[in-house]
């Protein structure tokens, strides 16, 4: 009898699921499943309308894209990368922007709507905790393929129907150890990208993950600055693009010279209409001026409050930076209801 009740219950559930065909389907997937591609590099995942992925937050959104409403062509923007753990060697970008109608999407957000939405996605809904790099989170949302990656986003449609959500699983577990690689693992001898559509080696393997490129020099230090793109090269003549974030360190310190390592998020920004086996780069959100590794280690020495530029003394240089930034604020992190 109990078995009959169970079968009845299951049949009812199946009927109710099939009747509610307006509801989007949701699949719990690994980053590897979501990022799967065909031989041309185009994303193949389509099993469900929405996905749920888990992983570690790699960056503060305002260190790579400016959240300021109304700014530039796309308006305020927000993006974090989530890296899988264990066997799930891949990662996914989660993106949100203001003017979808300018990039082939539909609708746009007012400045106030943008800020409210950024407040929501910056914060764990259960605890009010503000997400930080090194947190383990769960992201539920729609997805859209662009430029070689399957991104979680609002499918470029403004409004609440395509909202994504982020929940905290565990705060402060720490960033993944950046995987050490050399340009020989990313480029062939003729300087073309190493591309494997199974994503088991070469550029695709590292996409969406934190990496450490060993032993390179900056070719074009004159390009140094927030939001700029540099080229680094190794002793064999292979080179690679490094996208600088908008962290203050790119203004505060000059470019490191000589042989350095670069720690950043392995990214792909191929042309929107393809080909999708190019456009690989490493995105470095910020720099702490250490001189040997292009990264922000996040551990400041000195213990002097007010030492804004981290040179172990509090003086007019710090005051200058303070006055330059006086009354600025970070949209999406203040005035949140
Ligand atoms: Ca790709
Ligand atoms: Ca100082």
Image (cartoon, rainbow, N blue to C red):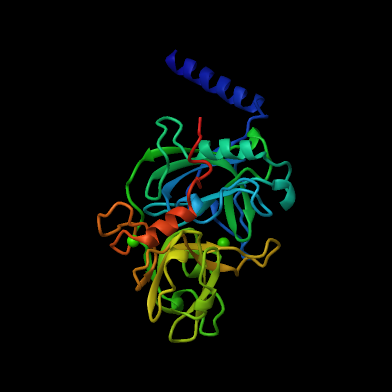
On the question of residue 144 being in view, the answer is yes
The relative height of residue 5 versus residue 194 in the rendered view (above or below) is above
Query: In the image shown, does 69 or 165 lie closer to the viewer?
Result: 69
On the question of residue 89 being in view, the answer is no
Q: Residue at x 27, y 55 (%)?
A: 304
Q: Residue furthest bottom?
A: 236
Q: Where does residue 12 sit, x and y in percent of width and height?
A: 57, 19
Query: In the image shown, does 228 or 152 lie closer to the viewer?
Result: 228
Query: In the image shown, does 333 or 151 lie closer to the viewer?
Result: 333
Residue 20 in which image quadrant: top right
Q: Residue at x 44, y 13 (%)?
A: 1
The relative height of residue 163 versus residue 91 in the rendered view (above or below) is above
Q: Residue at x 53, y 43 (%)?
A: 331
Residue 195 in which image quadrant: bottom right
Q: Residue at x 54, y 40 (%)?
A: 118
* Left or right, residue 270 beside residue 138: right
Q: Where does residue 13 sit, x and y in percent of width and height?
A: 56, 23
Q: Where does residue 129 sit, x and y in percent of width and height?
A: 40, 36
State ligand 2's quadrant: bottom left
* Left or right, residue 202 beside residue 100: left
């Amino acid at each position: 009898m109990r078995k009959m009740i169970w079968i009845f219950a299951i049949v009812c559930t199946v009927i109710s699921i099939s009747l509610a065909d307006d509801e989007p389907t949701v699949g719990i997937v690994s980053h590897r499943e979501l990022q799967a591609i065909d031989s041309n590099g185009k994303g193949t995942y389509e099993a469900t309308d929405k996905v749920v992925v888990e992983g570690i937050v790699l960056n503060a959104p305002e260190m790579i894209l400016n959240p300021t409403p109304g700014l530039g062509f796309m308006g305020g923007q927000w993006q974090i990368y989530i890296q899988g753990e264990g066997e799930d060697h891949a990662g996914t970008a989660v993106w949100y922007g203001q003017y979808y109608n300018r990039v082939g999407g539909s609708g746009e957000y007012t400045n106030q709507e943008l800020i409210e939405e950024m407040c929501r996605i910056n914060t764990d809904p259960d605890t009010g905790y503000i997400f930080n790099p090194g947190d383990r989170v769960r992201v539920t949302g729609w997805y859209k393929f662009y430029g070689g990656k399957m991104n979680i986003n609002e499918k470029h449609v403004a409004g609440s129907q395509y909202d994504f959500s982020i929940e905290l699983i565990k705060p402060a577990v720490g960033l993944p150890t950046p995987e050490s690689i050399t340009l020989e693992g990313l480029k062939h001898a003729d300087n073309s990208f190493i591309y494997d559509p199974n994503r088991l080696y070469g550029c695709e393997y590292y996409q969406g993950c934190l990496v450490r490129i060993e032993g390179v020099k900056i070719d074009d230090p004159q390009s140094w600055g927030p939001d700029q793109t540099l080229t680094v090269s190794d002793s064999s003549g292979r080179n690679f693009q490094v996208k600088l974030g908008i962290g203050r360190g790119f203004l505060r310190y000059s470019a490191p010279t000589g042989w350095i390592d670069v720690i950043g998020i392995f990214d792909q920004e191929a042309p929107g209409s393809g080909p999708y086996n190019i456009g690989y780069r490493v995105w470095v959100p910020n720099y702490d001026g250490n001189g040997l590794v292009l990264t922000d280690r996040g551990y400041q020495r000195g213990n002097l409050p007010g030492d804004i530029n981290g040179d172990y003394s509090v003086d007019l240089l710090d005051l200058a930076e303070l006055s330059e930034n006086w009354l600025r604020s970070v949209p999406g992190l203040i005035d949140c209801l």
